[in-house]
Image (cartoon, grey):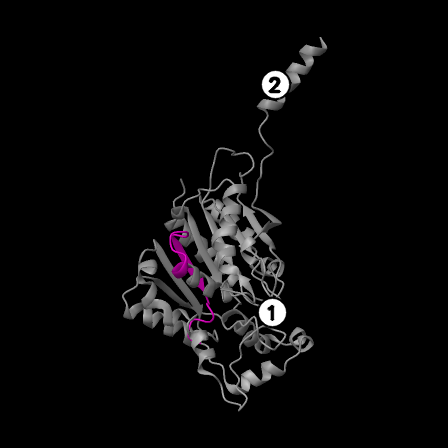
Amino acid sequence: MLKTAFAAAAALLVTVPAIAQETARVVTTTFESPSLAGNLEGNSTAREVVVVTPPGYDENTDQHYPVVYFLHGYWAPVAAQQAGFRLDEAVQAASEAGNDFIMVMPDGFSKLRGGFYSSGPTVGDYESMVADDLVNWVDANYRTLADPASRGLAGHSMGGYGTARLAMHRPGIFSSIYMMSACCLDPMVMTAEDAARIEAMTEEEAAAAGFGELASLSTLATWSPDPTADNVFHVYTGLREDGTLDPLVNQRLAANSPVVLVPQYLPALNGLEAFAMDIGDQDFLLAGNAAFRAELDRFGVDYDFELYEGDHGNRIRERIRTEVLPFFAEHLDAE
């Protein structure tokens, strides 16, 4: 009698479906990024990551999903970025429209508040952190459609820059991209005065610095690193003893500018399934975006562009929901 009752109970457990996941769910966890090992800033290889799964993910165990990777901007860590962006709202709205995605936002923070999804000995290899370590981890731990045709990449500000950079440097991983209010597209320029200020800056001053003060140091650490530099930030400022500036520092900055890089990476850009970018009409980054678009136009790269009413950040949460995920619903393979 006892054996019969146990068998019946076991059979019931097998046939009862998983508890329904009725809404998009946010999980913040960590993944290991070997690509960041050994960086001079001490940025951790254990990276936080926000993963949003769509309604029905738990119970539909045979279903696999396209993935949209989202790269956040400079200054704030990933938890604060999610609090502002609310990626779960976008995934929920997409599902209600009949388009289910997994959405993933990795931690792009650094000691100086942003690694610009780039690669160098001072900050570490954030580019490979996304393109290799993160993508492999997501495919191994979630039911993804593990194919470039089902992978999209988007980002805001620093993340918009990272989106362009990865699309050019790492083709064949993401098939479609969407750049939102991208920073750092045109060449940045270091002056001797800038270099002298950075040379004199202490770690305490950097920790207390505002956005504008710190951004120039952070980009220098990323794109003009120097492991042997006689300063605490491991950067090459280009400042000479006579007060003039070595032109090499600005050449290094220009070498990381998408405006400069466009003609070198035409096969990667032209190989995208879809390419979109947007920016608000009151955004302080309008000039750089216009310069980038001029080069795309000069070389015949196909892309969609929208200039909307807004500034650098006031409509990003809304537009991820109303523009970004609908764009990927149109262009990513869902089966």
Check disc 1 and report its element: helix, strand or loop.
loop
Q: Which residue is label 2 attached to?
A: 11
Question: Which percent across, then down, holds residue 169?
Answer: 40, 60
- Tell me, yes or no, whether the highlighted magenta stretch contains residue 175: yes
Residue 301's mark? none
Q: CA distance from mark 2 to mark 1?
A: 56 Å
Check disc 2 and report its element: helix, strand or loop.
helix
Q: Quadrant of residue 153?
A: bottom left
Please name which of the two marks, 2 or 1, marks the residue nearer to the observer: 1
233 vs 150, nearest the viewer: 233
User: 188 left or right of 263?
Assistant: right
Graded by Cα atoms within 10 Å as few (under 14), some (14 to 19) or many (20 or more), the crowding at tag 1 reads many
Q: Which residues are magenta?
A: 167-187
Question: Which percent across, then down, holds residue 328?
Answer: 41, 52
Q: Which residue is label 1 attached to?
A: 112
Q: Quadrant of the C terminus?
A: top left
> Count of labels shown?
2
Establish if 136 lies above or below 318: above
Type of secondary structure dominating the magenta stretch: loop
User: 20 left or right of 308?
Assistant: right
Q: Residue at x 58, y 23 (%)?
A: 15
